[in-house]
Image (cartoon, grey):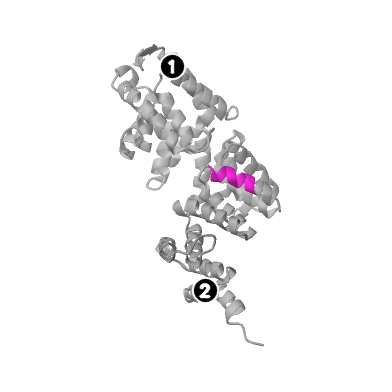
């Protein structure tokens, strides 16, 4: 037994709650994920004073599984759970426990409650993975995918064999993007295995694949089905793409509802889309609202939103003109300057009736080889006088 929060508890009962929650959260290949029931299990273990339960709840808040994404809540739970997990690692009874090892690694991976150190995190994930923990096996794969993809595939395969839906999803992503090993049929197979367990990331991947139609034949019906499932699971990327699909189908009001849900989880693409919706309404209040959404996205590094914010301040659109602030946002946007951003600047300036600025940006983009910029120059500015 372990003393936690000055209370004695039966570790075996608390760990059973966590093991049940783990299966409900990541899958076991036999049923559907159920985030709400997983949360109940983790909360039951937490109520008994079992510190690793805080790590599982923190992870769910961080990733947006069963909760809206909330890093502050992740930090709060990590600070609560870390001292107890640290003390458990000092005990021979718990130091070899796969759940405690994974939690110790998790807190170092996110850097809340203790220092962020990926090397320490990986070390304890490997200890936990060697004890058969599927979440730790999946985590090793995520850490090493850039530098050791074959090692990642090895650990994901071990995790997937236990039914871990996130490992199955990651194997699918490996086969869709890994150069010489690329195999769309294999990616579809693994994503479908994962999605059929209710994994929102795999559902999103399938929906987006069918929506964009780059690797498979475009299929709006399949895209809608998978994106809706993932969006209903609270996955913000899916809520954003489901909104895009609805907008294309003429259901803009319904799209806005989904973008608002995603934007509340700080999804910068959804925030950008909401900005466009309000910009298109054209009245002063809507222009102010557009700027508010674009600013939220711009602060997260969304370059097109930075462009919109910068030009709004330059031209005084929806806000008092502020040349310095406008230039600051444009500098941030053009920090990774390319022909596409210059072209977009020209289009935005043209559509807001600032033709001199539009000409400047379009000519710059055209000089950088942007074919559409050359076409717009010919169509809008350099067309022959009849």
Q: Which of marks 2 and 1 is nearer the N terminus?
A: 1
Task: Give the magenta range.
Answer: 256-264
Could you tell me residue 289's position as x and y percent? 56, 53
Could you tell me residue 128's position as x and y percent? 38, 28
Label 1 crowd bin: few (<14), some (14–19), many (20+), radius 10 Å: some
Query: 51 and 203: which one is in front?
Result: 51
Name the outermost residue toward the front.
320
Q: Is residue 258 magenta?
A: yes
Q: Does residue 336 appear left or right of residue 93 in this picture?
A: right
| Residue tagged 1 | 48
Q: In which quadrant of the rendered image does the C terminus lie?
A: bottom right
Query: 98 and 56: which one is in front?
Result: 56
Measured in 3D between alpha carbons, the distance from the residue under mark 2 to the one under mark 1, in whole angstroms, is 64 Å
| Residue tagged 2 | 362
User: Which residue is located at x 56 percent, y 49 percent?
Assistant: 270
Residue 244 numbered mark, or none: none
Mark 1: which secondary structure?
Answer: loop
Secondary structure of the magenta portion, mostly?
helix
Mark 2: which secondary structure?
Answer: helix
């Amino acid at each position: 037994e372990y003393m936690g929060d000055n209370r004695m508890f039966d570790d075996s009962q608390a760990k059973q709650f966590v093991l049940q929650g783990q299966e409900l959260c990541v899958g076991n290949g036999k049923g559907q994920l159920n985030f709400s029931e997983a949360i109940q299990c983790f909360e039951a273990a937490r109520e008994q004073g079992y510190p690793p339960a805080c790590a599982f709840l923190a992870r769910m808040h961080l990733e947006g599984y069963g909760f809206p994404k909330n890093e502050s809540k992740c930090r709060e739970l990590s600070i609560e759970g870390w001292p107890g997990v640290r003390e458990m690692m000092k005990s021979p009874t718990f130091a070899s426990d796969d759940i405690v090892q994974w939690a110790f690694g998790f807190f170092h991976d996110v850097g809340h409650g203790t220092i962020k150190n990926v090397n320490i995190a990986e070390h304890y994930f490997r200890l936990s993975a060697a004890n058969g923990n599927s979440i730790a096996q999946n985590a090793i794969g995520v850490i090493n995918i850039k530098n050791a993809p074959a090692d990642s595939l090895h650990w994901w395969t071990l995790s997937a064999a236990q039914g871990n839906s996130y490992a199955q999803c990651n194997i699918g992503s490996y086969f869709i993007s890994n150069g010489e090993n690329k195999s769309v049929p294999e990616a579809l197979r693994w994503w479908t295995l994962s999605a059929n367990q209710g994994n929102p990331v795999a559902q999103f991947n399938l929906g987006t694949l069918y929506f964009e139609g780059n690797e498979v034949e475009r299929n709006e019906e399949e895209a809608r089905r998978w994106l809706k499932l993932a969006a209903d699971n609270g996955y913000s990327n899916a809520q954003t793409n489901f909104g895009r699909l609805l907008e294309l189908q003429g259901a803009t009001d319904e799209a806005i509802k989904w973008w608002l849900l995603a934007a509340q989880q700080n999804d910068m693409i959804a925030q950008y889309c909401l900005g466009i919706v309000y910009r298109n309404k054209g009245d002063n209040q809507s222009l102010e609202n557009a700027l508010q959404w674009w600013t939220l996205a711009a602060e997260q590094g969304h370059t097109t939103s930075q462009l919109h914010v910068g030009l709004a301040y330059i031209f005084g659109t929806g806000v008092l003109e502020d040349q310095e602030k406008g230039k600051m946002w444009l500098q941030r946007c053009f920090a990774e300057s390319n022909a596409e951003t210059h072209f977009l600047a020209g289009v935005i300036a043209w559509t807001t009736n600032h033709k001199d600025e539009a000409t400047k940006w379009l000519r710059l983009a055209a000089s950088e080889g942007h074919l559409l910029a050359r076409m717009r120059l010919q169509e809008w500015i350099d067309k022959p006088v009849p």
